[in-house]
Image (cartoon, helix red, strand yellow):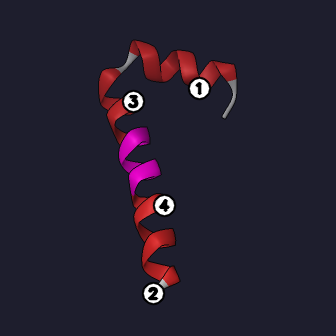
Amino acid sequence: MSDESRMNAFQNPDKRFMLLRNEDNKLYHSVLSRY
């Protein structure tokens, strides 16, 4: 993730939330794929 997109996410809480959701989903799927 580039600094620029980090700044954009920081300035735009909705986008930051979406990014967090994205990370959560990746984690969730990686956990699911282990079982």
Label 4 sits on a secondary structure element that is helix
Residue 19: x %, y % from top left: 43, 40
Q: Which residue is mark 3?
A: 16
Q: Which is closer to the viewer, label 2 or label 1?
A: 2
Residue at the spot x=67%, y=20% of the render? 3
The quarter of the picture where residue 32 lies is: bottom left
Q: Earlier in the sequence, mark 4 or mark 1?
A: 1
Count residues near mark 3 (Cα–Cα under 10 Å), then give few for <14, some for 14-19, many for 20+.
some
Which amino acid, by three-letter code, is at mark 4? Lys
C-alpha distance separating marks 2 and 4: 15 Å
Give the magenta-colored segment's residue range: 19-24
Q: Are marks 4 and 3 in contact (CB under 8 Å)?
A: no
For residue 10, above or below residue 16: above
Q: Earlier in the sequence, mark 3 or mark 2?
A: 3
Q: Are marks 2 and 4 in contact (CB under 8 Å)?
A: no
Residue 24: x %, y % from top left: 39, 52
Q: Are marks 4 and 1 in contact (CB under 8 Å)?
A: no
Q: Which is closer to the viewer, label 4 or label 3?
A: 4
For residue 7, above or below residue 1: above
Q: Which residue is mark 2?
A: 35
Label 2 sits on a secondary structure element that is loop
Q: Which is closer to the viewer, label 3 or label 2?
A: 2
Main secondary structure along the magenta-highlighted residues: helix
